[in-house]
Image (cartoon, rainbow, N blue to C red):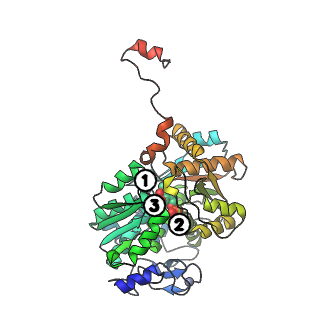
Amino acid sequence: MAVQAAQAASGTTVDSPAGGPGTVLGPAAALSCRECGERTPLGPVFACEACFGPLEIAYEFPGGGTSGPAGLRERIEAGPDNIWRYAPLLPVPADVAAKPNINPGFTKLVQADRLARELGVTGSLHIKDDSGNPTHSFKDRVVAIAVEAARAFGFTTLSCSSTGNLAGAVGAAAARAGLRSCVFIPHDLEQGKVVMAAVYGGELVGIEGNYDDVNRFCSELIGDPAGEGWGFVNVNLRPYYAEGSKTLAYEICEQLGWRLPDQLVVPIASGSQLTKIDKGLKELIALGLVEDKPYKIFGAQAEGCSPVSRAFKDGHDVVRPVRPETIAKSLAIGNPADGPYVLDIARRTGGAVEDVDDPRIVEAIKLLARTEGIFAETAGGVTVGVTKKLIEEGRLDPALTTVVLNTGDGLKTLDAVAPTTGMSAVIRPNLDSFREAGLAS
Ligand SMILES: Cc1ncc(COP(=O)(O)O)c(C=O)c1O
Ligand SMILES: [Zn+2]
């Protein structure tokens, strides 16, 4: 096992107690390389043996084509109010909904008319509010899929490198599944993220460094006997984990009445979520579940960590790593693994990648809260702030149907708004004092 783990660290394969041609994970047929297309049997493998490119799940959907599997739409609509309604499109066993799981998804798609008016949107504007997940971020979706892969491959410890939200999602999912967890974060994250990650009783380790240091450390750990038998959800289980983000695309379309939105604004950390939303939309088109029409995907970053936005603006295909310096810590990945794929998607769909500075992130968090009653974490401030900027610059069409993602809960990043948010007044408990404060109608 140690030798096999070392192979994983060198970017090739890792065998495990399970995996290989006999593994059945629903419609997942194999792993396929995003660079050269080489296929590999399902297993805890994340890089192509031929070219070291990233692997992703290749599917064989029964009866695909223009009408999709018979009765698929009806089957989905009759399914549970969580991501397992889409189990026929995910790399999970058919009986997944019956297993102990934190059952994320089917979060609200909020019609944001008051925000639309403030932003000058004449079409329809929606917030996909993923703060409503069990651990209050979209990361529950990706972890739920990774847990199924960990079970299939016989891993007993669940791990990850995290900018905060993933650590909490792994802690909760492992607790529910009865697995051990040991997760790694930069040591200086927001208290809300640290407490949320620690409360589920697993090991939480702060690393003296930024996320990119944490990630490097985890790659080393996978190659060491100390990490033997560990499923790192975003490293050796990454092909499975990443597929969880497709459910955002499925839900958005289903909630729009099985229609594609015209424009989506998606946050970028590693870029995985954005690439899988695109994959999910393309699948729905191929299966005939939505009409085939163009859509644009816009990526959003914080100015203080905007390597993909920089590359987009410079017209580059490669993303030059940066050292993050922003309040949007959940998006603070200076060397984003999926950056080049994000650039491809933004360019192919006619979207863009843009960024906003920290004061505008705070402004956008408050704007969303004041207009729609949604308290977003800093990542939501980034998407709303970028949406505002793109509309002001005439790059996002205000007359179309637009979906903006809020991927996390503001309660976890109170520090961002606390300095500029507080009580209107402190008064004595009598009416005179209330009137003196100028608050009477
Ligand atoms: C709240 C939130 N939104 C978005 C993202 C972006 O995820 P990805 O790495 O898939 O781009 C993250 C990643 O940590 C996150 O925590
Ligand atoms: Zn390859």
Kind of residue at badge 3: Gly
Sooner in the amino-acid sequence: mark 2 or mark 3: 3
Which of the two discs, 1 and 2, labels the residue nearer the N terminus? 1
Question: Looking at the picture, which amino acid does disc 1 mark?
Answer: Asp
Q: Which residue is mark 3?
A: 209
Q: Residue at x 55, y 47 (%)?
A: 381
Find residue 298 and report its horizontal and vertical position in percent.
63, 58
Q: Position of residue 413 (x, y in %)?
A: 45, 47
Q: Is 115 located above or below residue 108 in the figure?
A: above
View quadrant of ligand 2:
bottom right
**What's the residue at 67%, 42% (across, down)?**
120
* Drawn side of residue 125 relative to residue 9, left or right: right
Where in the figure is residue 27, as x and y percent of width and height?
Answer: 45, 77
Q: Tell whether label 3 touches label 1 (CB within 8 Å).
A: no
Q: Position of residue 419 (x, y in %)?
A: 48, 37
Classify mark 3: residues with Cα within 10 Å, few (<14), some (14-19) or many (20+). Answer: few
Callout in the foreground (1, 2): 1
SS for dot 2: helix
Q: Is mark 3 within 8 Å of ligand 1?
A: no
Whether the residue under disc 1 has CB within 8 Å of ligand 1: no
Q: Secondary structure at mark 1?
A: loop
Quarter of the rendering containing residue 337: bottom right
Q: Nearer the viewer, residue 330 or 41?
A: 330
Q: What element does badge 3 sit on?
A: loop
Q: Which residue is mark 1?
A: 188
Q: Is residue 100 visible?
A: no
Within 8 Å of ligand 1, the CB of disc 2?
yes
**Which kind of residue does numbered mark 2 sit on?**
Ser
The residue that mark 2 highlights is 272
Cα distance in 3D space between marks 1 and 3: 8 Å
Above or below, 434 against 361 in this view is above
